[in-house]
Image (tube, helix red, strand yellow):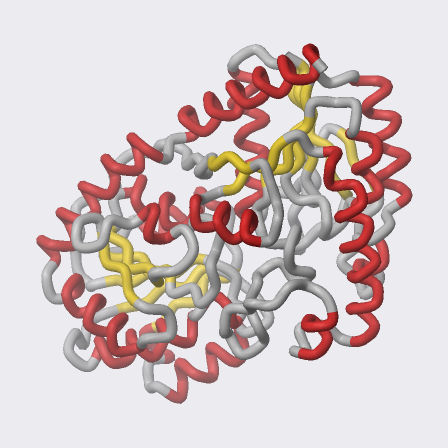
């Protein structure tokens, strides 16, 4: 089968990008001709575009314009479709760089949209208000009223939204990363929707736990990830577990503020800031973790860092929002806690940091669960079945 994958970015950086690059390789390993089209935009310094085809992209202030009308993406995709003639097109993210201008080109091709964020119903992609509360309003004037967008960006992104709504019928199917995400999208009129959980690459079990008791976090250092909640809970837990250490992998706009908070809490010397690392390097650091914390404030569509921790054999504490309750079995593979609840997170940390036997058992059970339910092979086979179904649908229409 000839398969064209489309994503805003072609770098091996964020979760969506790593998922698309892995899917390309897994499909190629099964004998399919698979190519990836993305913008040339680079999110992380030092990373490189790994796509087979690329077009203009930018992370400058002009991004708000190009993500609404990227003529380079339109012209490039038109050429690719003529040259490659794919049997099916699989789009993941396109409204941060490639823009809705690509959609009219896809109307005659079997095509699915695997949405990795809530961009289809929210211009900023999170359905979260600036103060961290869930947004319950429909996109539109509320985005300006609630100060989610500046007047300038609001005006441009409302044009993007109109173009998306006009051409969204180009997709035969929407794929959500979780049932929680499916429900949110269906509530706002998006469909038809199937659910395919992200796949996680298999790896060997980490070594048995050893001192010091170590807590890990991986993700962007931005407000919606809840790292400030983790720092406060860790500081409280450390009062009872003096040797506890925290390792943080990631970068983001809140890094300076989070470092200052760690100093204010008196834990600066107990927190190691790793910055952005390739996944293989991060895994080496995280092999020593007794628990990995995912303290997100928003309803994340999935949780790649959660399944990566589980496949490693690390117990998990996660906020009970978004897809996390579909991944973590509370009390068996880890603990679910309310978002923003420092007390609950502190209590969960202490249960594991004071009981390495429990952390070890939860990690082992979580690993077996992830191997069964969240493997890359399982994800790839699900998509192959969907591709075949879409092709058959087009053949009979």
Task: Give the image location of residue 48, x and y in percent.
Answer: 68, 43
Residue 396 left/right relative to 166: left
Residue 159 left/right relative to 174: right
* Towards the viewer: 383 or 49: 383
Query: What's the residue at 25%, 78% (across, down)?
Result: 343
Query: What's the residue at 71%, 50% (across, down)?
Result: 42
- Asked which quadrant contains residue 351, the reply is bottom left
* Towards the viewer: 105 or 12: 105
Query: What's the residue at 78%, 45% (across, down)?
Result: 98
Q: Looking at the picture, does residue 44 appear above or below residue 342?
A: above
Q: Is residue 157 visible?
A: yes
Q: Looking at the picture, does residue 238 appear above or below residue 107?
A: below
Which quarter shows the C terminus?
A: top right
Task: Give the image location of residue 8, x and y in percent.
Answer: 70, 44
Residue 370 left/right relative to 252: left
- Asked which quadrant contains residue 32, the reply is top right
Task: Give the image location of residue 385, x and y in percent.
Answer: 51, 19
Q: Is residue 5 visible?
A: no
Q: Looking at the picture, does residue 313 appear above or below residue 194?
A: below
Query: What's the residue at 33%, 52% (across, down)?
Result: 325
Task: Give the image location of residue 369, x and y in percent.
Answer: 25, 37
Which quarter shows the N terminus?
A: top right
Query: How many marks can you see?
Result: 0
- Asked which quadrant contains residue 330, the reply is bottom left
């Amino acid at each position: 089968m000839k398969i064209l994958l489309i994503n805003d970015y072609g770098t091996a950086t964020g979760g969506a990008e790593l998922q698309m690059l892995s899917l390309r390789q897994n499909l190629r390993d099964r004998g399919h001709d698979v190519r990836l089209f993305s913008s040339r935009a680079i999110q992380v310094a030092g990373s490189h575009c790994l796509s087979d085809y690329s077009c203009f992209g930018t992370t400058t202030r002009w991004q708000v314009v190009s993500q609404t009308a990227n003529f380079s993406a339109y012209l490039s995709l038109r050429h690719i479709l003529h040259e490659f003639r794919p049997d099916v097109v699989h789009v993941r993210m396109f409204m941060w760089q490639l823009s809705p201008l690509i959609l009219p080109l896809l109307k005659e091709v079997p095509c699915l949209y695997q949405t990795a964020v809530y961009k289809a119903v929210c211009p900023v992609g999170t359905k979260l208000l600036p103060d961290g509360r869930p947004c319950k309003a429909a996109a539109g004037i509320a985005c300006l009223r609630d100060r989610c967008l500046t007047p300038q960006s609001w005006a441009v992104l409302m044009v993007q939204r109109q173009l998306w709504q006009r051409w969204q019928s180009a997709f035969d199917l929407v794929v959500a990363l979780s049932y929680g995400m499916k429900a949110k999208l269906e509530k706002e009129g998006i469909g038809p929707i199937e659910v395919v959980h992200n796949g996680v690459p298999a790896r060997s079990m980490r070594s048995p736990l050893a001192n010091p008791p170590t807590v890990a976090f991986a993700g962007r250092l931005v407000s919606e990830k809840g790292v400030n909640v983790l720092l406060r809970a860790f500081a409280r837990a450390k009062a009872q577990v003096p040797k506890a250490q925290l390792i943080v992998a990631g970068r983001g706009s809140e890094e300076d503020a989070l470092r200052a908070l760690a100093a204010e809490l008196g834990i600066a010397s107990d927190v190691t800031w790793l910055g952005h690392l390739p996944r293989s390097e991060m895994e080496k650091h995280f092999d020593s973790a007794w628990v990995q914390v995912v303290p997100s404030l928003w309803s994340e569509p999935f949780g790649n860092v959660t399944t990566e921790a589980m496949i490693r054999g690390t117990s998990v504490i996660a906020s009970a929002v978004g897809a996390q309750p579909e991944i973590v079995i509370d009390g068996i593979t880890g603990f679910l806690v309310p978002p923003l609840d420092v007390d609950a997170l502190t209590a969960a940390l202490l249960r594991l940091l004071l009981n390495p036997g429990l952390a070890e058992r939860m990690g082992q059970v979580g690993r077996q669960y992830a191997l069964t339910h969240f493997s890359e092979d399982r994800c790839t086979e699900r998509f192959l079945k969907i591709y075949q179904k879409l092709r058959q649908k087009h053949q009979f229409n």
